[in-house]
Amino acid sequence: MINNSSSGQGHESLVSTVLGEVLERDPSTIRVVRADSLTALPSNSPVGSRMAIMLGGATAGAAKRIKQALLAIAAHNFECSPEDLEYRGGDISLKGVPSKKLSWEALVEIAHRKFHRLPGGLEPGLQASFVWEVPTGGGLPTADGRIQMYPCYAFEAHVVLVGDAVVADWSAARVAPGITDGASAVPIASAGGDPIRFPAPGAGRWSVQVQVRFPGGSDSAAYYWLLDVR
């Protein structure tokens, strides 16, 4: 998630390319979204080339933190030091023992669902934020009397939030309130992966049963949302 406006510069392509390079993932599988005007950080207009510098720097910083978190998860599960691990394409293996490996999907599942396999001090969820500021932007002029290219005390900062989908596929069905066994369920929508979106049922008070299957096909869960549609 990025916190800036755009005027056709292709910020989404920039962010997905930088993320893909750092995390060694296909940029086409990375979805870039924006915060709205109420929740985003204060921002000026995206002029000139500074978005490549500022937004690209923030994106790379957040991606590196995600990579460090993945390595910490793998090191904890392999009972070794992160320096003993090799990161390749999102998968992490023990150096010299390529068969001992955790895939990208397995690492994401640990981060989001199998909290008991997380190292101490690492919060659940695979996400990171990073604020990038203009170098030497803390003073005007500098100690030796020079003015930096962007003469301002504080340049706009960008926060990048990085994560990954952990849902293989899902289906939503309308059921009567209090029904949890799927009886008389009326299908609403289904799809593969995130996000989970479906049209609201007709007017009235309804429960929506959402069946979720996680990567690997060996685990699933059912969630119930109570809706009051008017």
Image (spheres, rainbow, N blue to C red):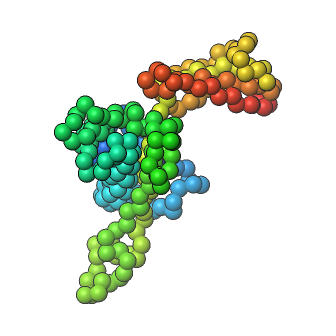
Q: In screen coordinates, is 116 left or right of 199?
A: left
| Residue 46 pos. (x, y %) | 40, 57
Name the side, left or right, on which 144 lies relative to 55.
Answer: left
Can residue 61 be seen by looking at this rendering?
Answer: yes
Relative to 51, say whether 183 is above or below. Answer: above
Q: Which residue is the extreme one toward the top?
A: 184
Q: Nearer the viewer, residue 42 or 188?
A: 188
Residue 55 occupies which quadrant of the picture? bottom left
**Residue lying at 38% horizontally and 62% vertically, measured from the top left:** 132
Q: Against 97, is 199 above or below?
A: above
Q: Residue 170 in the image: x percent, y percent?
A: 55, 23
Q: Residue at x 46, y 20 (%)?
A: 217
Image vertical order of residue 203 relative to residue 96, above or below:
above
Give the tally of numbered discs. 0
Q: Give the side of residue 188 with respect to residue 165, left or right.
A: right
Q: Residue at the location (41% across, 58% down)?
A: 130
Q: Nearer the viewer, residue 15 or 20?
A: 20
The residue furthest front is 79
Image coords of residue 101 (percent x, y): 30, 34
Q: Position of residue 63 (x, y in %)?
A: 35, 49
Decide: is 99 above or below 145.
Answer: above
Q: Quadrant of the C terminus?
A: top right
The residue sitting at 65% across, 28% down in the picture is 223
Whether residue 13 is visible to the viewer of this picture, yes or no, is: no
